[in-house]
Image: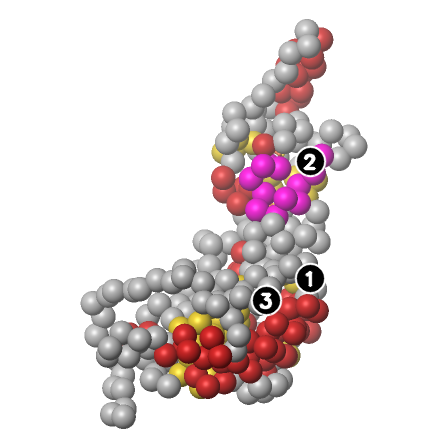
């Protein structure tokens, strides 16, 4: 599958704490209630709900990332299933159809998940309302570089590198995320400790993730590290190699502290590596007070 190195690039397609619940109910569709209207198919972030031979919808459990979108987005109208089916049947006799409003599940057939480990890791990375237990942050579970002016994660002479693996529609298995982490770990970066993927590593020296999550799937996940600026080419080339071995898309982002004259230190090293920076970027302006002191150069 093609991969995009969003940040930069010209020549390439680069782009816990664990809480276990007592039950393990996955995102399911109650066949006794489903009337096969198809509304949930359109809102599924992974496109993994399909109509079964019996005219009722089914979730592909291997591919479902437990993002909760189908359940959260569609209102439960609470109609009685046999009544809706009867109406549909009668209307069909007159070659008419019953179309539910697009933002409803007319009979409340979607069953919300109550997940236990390791399946719950899917929701932690895919449902934006779920908080990562190890970082206390929702979504992908990391502040990335956005709060750097306050936290000072990244200092002068350093580059922050984020590798996002998976996107809606494709997702990413943790076994693929592990392949990328292992390839990068060989180059000995400093993996960010307040990042959920780092916290799932058996050891940051190897990049290996815990075995019990490897066959789980997430909408996307971010590997986050800092490296010396001059090592940027080495890391980008390693990413280009490893992306050929994974079955999903990858995006790469980079950050460094602007110089007083406004220049961006990592730009030069990205160019030296043979890539072209994409102009998408953002400037965060905040009023936070730095919690660190930069060394005088
Ligand atoms: S929206 Fe509800 S009733 Fe319609 S297909 Fe999906 S689960 Fe079935
Ligand atoms: S939980 Fe997400 S991935 Fe799973 S069926 Fe619902 S929308 Fe699709």
User: Is 158 situated above or below 197?
Assistant: below
Instruction: State the residue position of label 1.
Output: 247
Task: Locate residue 229, reporting x and y percent.
Answer: 43, 83
The residue positioned 56% from the left and 56% from the top of the image is 167
- Which comes sooner in the sequence, label 1 or label 3? 3
Q: Give the magenta range.
A: 40-51
Task: Locate residue 184, reporting x and y percent.
Answer: 59, 80
> Residue 29's quadrant in the figure?
top right
The residue positioned 42% from the left and 78% from the top of the image is 268
Instruction: State the residue position of label 2.
Output: 57
User: Is 287 situated above or below 205?
Assistant: above
- Which comes sooner in the sequence, label 2 or label 3? 3
Query: Mark 2: is the Cβ under 8 angstroms from ligand 1?
Result: yes
- Which comes sooner in the sequence, label 2 or label 1? 2
Query: Mark 1: is the Cβ under 8 angstroms from ligand 2?
Result: no
Instruction: State the residue position of label 3.
Output: 12
The answer to the question of whether label 2 and label 1 lie on touching residues, with beta carbons closer than 8 A, is no
The answer to the question of whether label 1 and label 3 lie on touching residues, with beta carbons closer than 8 A, is no
Residue 102, visible in the rendered structure: yes
Asked if residue 45 is among those painted magenta in the image, a careful observer would answer yes
Task: Locate residue 18, reporting x and y percent.
Answer: 55, 69
Residue depth check, mark 1 versus mark 3: number of the one nearer the observer: 3
Residue 203, visible in the rendered structure: no
Residue depth check, mark 2 versus mark 3: number of the one nearer the observer: 3
């Amino acid at each position: 599958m093609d991969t995009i190195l969003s940040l930069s690039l010209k020549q390439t397609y680069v782009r816990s704490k664990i809480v276990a619940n007592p039950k393990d109910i996955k995102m399911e569709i109650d066949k006794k209630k489903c009337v096969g209207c198809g509304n949930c198919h359109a809102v599924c972030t992974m496109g993994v709900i399909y109509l079964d031979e019996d005219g009722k919808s089914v979730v592909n459990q291997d591919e479902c990332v437990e993002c909760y979108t189908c359940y959260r987005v569609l209102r439960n109208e609470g109609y009685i299933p046999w009544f809706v089916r009867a109406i549909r049947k009668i209307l069909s006799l007159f070659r008419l159809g019953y179309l539910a409003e697009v933002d409803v599940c007319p009979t409340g057939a979607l069953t919300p998940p109550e997940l236990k480990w390791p399946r719950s890791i899917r929701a932690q990375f895919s449902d934006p309302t779920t908080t990562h237990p190890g970082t206390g942050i929702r979504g992908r579970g990391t502040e990335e570089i956005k709060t750097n002016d306050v936290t000072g994660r990244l200092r002068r002479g350093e580059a922050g590198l984020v590798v996002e693996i998976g996107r809606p529609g494709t997702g990413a298995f943790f076994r693929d995320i592990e392949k990328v982490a292992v390839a990068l770990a060989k180059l000995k970066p400093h993996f960010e400790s307040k990042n959920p993927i780092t916290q799932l590593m058996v050891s940051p020296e190897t990049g290996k993730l815990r075995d019990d999550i490897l066959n789980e799937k997430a909408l996307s996940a971010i590997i986050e590290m800092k490296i010396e600026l001059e090592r940027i080419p080495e890391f980008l080339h390693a990413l280009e190699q490893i992306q050929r071995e994974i079955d999903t898309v990858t995006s790469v982002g980079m950050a460094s502290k602007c110089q007083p004259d406004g220049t961006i230190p990592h730009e030069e090293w990205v160019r030296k590596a043979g890539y072209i920076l994409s102009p998408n970027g953002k400037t965060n302006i905040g009023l936070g007070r730095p919690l660190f002191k930069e060394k005088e150069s």
